[in-house]
Image (cartoon, grey):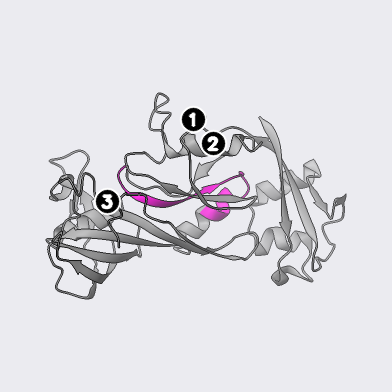
Amino acid sequence: MKPHTFTINIPHDLVGITIEEALKTYWGFSKKTIHQWRMDKAIDLNGELTQWKVELASFDRLSIRLSEEAQTYPATDLAILPLYEDDHLLIVNKPAGMDTHPNSPANTNTLANGVVHYLMSKGHNGYAQPIHRLDRDTTGAILFAKHSAVKPLLDRLLEQRLIKRTYWALVEGEMKKNSGTIKDPIGNDRHHNTRKRISPNGQHAITHFKKINFKEDLHVTWLELKLDTGRTHQIRVHLSYLGHPLAGDELYGGKKSPDFMAQALHAVRLSFKHPLTSEIIDVKAPELHVPPRFN
């Protein structure tokens, strides 16, 4: 395990607030974490150890030393494509045919393995944790925490639905509605281990869709989708239930073809307020499919 130090440039919102108040109230670090930092004398202000009752000012820099930062996954060079990066988090563009993280020790060709390699090639200690996931054949933006202190803050944003995710999909046939909301609950399919289905006793699920256009040459409709919930296979199940499965999504009734060898679903945008700097992060992920399908 290697120690890791991260630095926060104090945002305007924190001017006049004490270090202790910022840690507890503004950032919401846990009592256990704050206590450990106090015991370790882990926090410096502008390069010097100081009392936590000191009020923060413009242009202050708060540095926090983390004593235990383990490499989270084996490193594999997968030519990862960063979309955004700072000292705390990383957003990368996942290609199709790649898992978000390993499901067994033998699986070392996942996005997480590639992210660890990318970070370690820059001198980072190899800590990288995905905050959410995408299906193996879904492409697009995924958010990673680069240190253990920011991970619970990002987890909380996700739980509170404050990380906004926008998807593009190509569905079979012509969608007649220009927009709508699907609210049908989703449960397990007892006849198929990996498939989900609409079920009255399933989990609450809400998907909003908006029609971008109908691509007559491919006989598919291009949709923009936003989710209020994050159920497994939610978009795939909901659109299949409407009679418009994702192009290429054989598991849910779509047809594979030379144009669609995998499901046509792309996580095109991530937007949220940075939990440490208050910056608005708004990242768009270019489609990796060549030739592009979404154009």
Front tag of 1 and 3: 1
Dot 3 falls on a residue whose secondary structure is loop
List the residue tagged with mark 1: 76
Q: What stretch is highlighted in magenta?
A: 136-154
Residue 94's label in the rendered image is none
Dot 1 falls on a residue whose secondary structure is loop
Relative to 234, residue 133 above or below: above
Across and down, in percent, residue 221 comes to: 19, 65
| Amino acid found under the numbered disc labelled 2 | Val
Quadrant of the rendered structure where residue 22 is? bottom right
Residue at x 21%, y 76% (from the top left corner): 178
Work out whether residue 150 or residue 246 is closer to the camera in this orientation and state it.
246
Q: Do the residues labelled 2 and 1 touch (CB within 8 Å)?
A: yes
Separation of disc 2 and disc 1 at Cα? Answer: 7 Å
Q: Quick one: which residue is furthest to the top in this view?
A: 106
Residue at x 43%, y 28% (from the top left corner): 108
Residue 116's label in the rendered image is 2
The N terminus: image quadrant? top right
| Amino acid found under the numbered disc labelled 1 | Thr
Across and down, in percent, residue 230 comes to: 35, 56
Residue at x 61%, y 33% (from the top left corner): 70
Across and down, in percent, residue 166 comes to: 38, 63
Is 153 within the magenta? yes
List the residue tagged with mark 3: 233
Identify the mark nearer the N-term, 2 or 1.
Answer: 1
Separation of disc 3 and disc 2 at Cα? Answer: 26 Å
| Amino acid found under the numbered disc labelled 3 | His
Identify the mark nearer the N-term, 1 or 3.
Answer: 1
Dot 2 falls on a residue whose secondary structure is helix
Packing grade of label 2 (10 A; few <14, some 14-19, many >=20) is many
Relative to 104, residue 189 above or below: below
Work out whether residue 131 or residue 95 is closer to the camera in this orientation and state it.
95
